[in-house]
Image: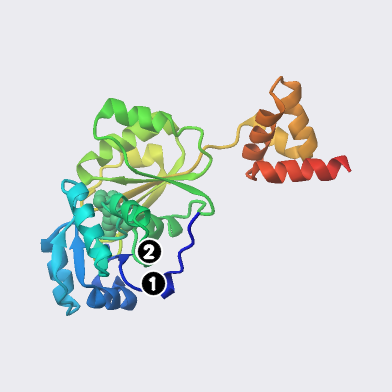
Amino acid sequence: MKIQKSFDAEGGALYLVPTPIGNLSDMTHRAVEVLKNADCVYAEDTRVTKVLLSHFHVSAPLFSYHVFNEGAKAEEIIKHLQAGKKIALVSDAGLPGISDPGYLVAREALDAGFPVISLPGANAALTALIASGLPCERFFFCGFLSAKPAQRRKELAELVDYPETLIFYEAPHRIRATLKDMFAVFQDRKAVVARELTKRHEEYLRGTLKELASLDHDYKGEIVIMVEGAEKTALQKDLEKLSLSEHFQHYLESGLPEKEAMKRTAKDRGISKSDVYRELMKEKR
Ligand code: SAM
């Protein structure tokens, strides 16, 4: 158990800094401040970040941190932290660590006892989700699917029962094949393709998977796909009409052990197992 008080961070600290996903005006003041005050900045592609840093007059030394040198660079970053330095990590766009390098060094910095401070900012998935018109209270971020068709279909099949809105990143040259696979697996659910967010050619295509998969459209640029979650089954709908203890009883009578019945009841009702337990205890009294 460790408690991190970020604002008291003295000495070495790792800052995870968001950068715009297309529109430079989405760079936050705090992100610029942190980059200006950093002893060095590590970036996924130093050529991309050099342009950003020069736009915001940041002169901190710039080094690379990408998927192919992550291990060695994480070690280097830990040494800087041990020397008391403030290190900023950015990716090419959006939040580091989200379908981008960042996780490894964050984990290693924490393991080594240093604070990891994340700044809020641009992110393609959440930006797309909140304007999609699909439920955004609960969602499941799936990132990139496999580029291999058979594996991609397998990954989609594993998501078929998820009731939450599903969010995917996809490359433009694969979008048609992916939408066709999604239609085959998820059938004709509502879906939204968000393209070129925050840029001049930003667009949202809202429809059904059938419509989107058969649309003859110029899908250039960067893309987020969102798919409505699975409809509740008739059984789940019936179970919701029951009181919590009747719901739990249904699973016990169907032969499940108590622990499993509690787990299933909690999952169906979207609450925690301890909430189920508490409610059952209340009803018993
Ligand atoms: N770290 C980033 C984030 O926080 O969103 C994601 C990086 S990932 C390597 C790049 C993918 O994010 C793109 O292929 C696309 O699916 C999505 N993406 C990034 N920028 C986007 C934009 N402006 N519009 C739509 N999708 C975008």
Q: Nearer the viewer, residue 223 or 208?
A: 223
Whether residue 255 is visible here, answered yes or no, is yes
- Give ligand 1's quarter of the image: bottom left
Q: Amino acid at mark 2?
A: Pro
Reply above or below: 191 against 221: above
Q: Pinpoint residue 282: horizontal percent, then vertical percent.
A: 83, 45
| Name of the residue lying farthest toward the front | 83
Q: Secondary structure at mark 2?
A: loop
Tag 1 secondary structure: loop
CA–CA distance in space, label 2 to label 1: 7 Å
Q: Residue 247, labelled with which disc?
A: none
Model colouring: rainbow
* Residue at the left extreme of this rendering: 47
Q: Image point 75% across, 38% down: which residue?
A: 241
Classify the position of the C terminus by image quarter.
top right
The quadrant holding residue 266 is top right
Out of 13 and 255, give the one closest to the viewer: 13
Indicate the amino acid at tag 1.
Answer: Ala
- Report the residue marked by disc 1: 9
Q: Name the side, left or right, on which 17 lies relative to 57.
A: right
Q: Residue at x 20, y 78 (%)?
A: 56
According to the picture, the residue beneath numbered tag 2 turns out to be 115
Give neighbour class at mark 2: few <14, some 14-19, many 20+ (Cα, 10 Å): many
Q: How many marks?
A: 2
Q: Position of residue 118 (x, y in %)?
A: 37, 64
Q: Residue furthest right?
A: 285
- Which sits in the foreground, 247 or 53? 53
* 82 on left or right of 60: right
Residue 18 x %, y %: 30, 65
For the point 72% across and 21% down, the residue is 254
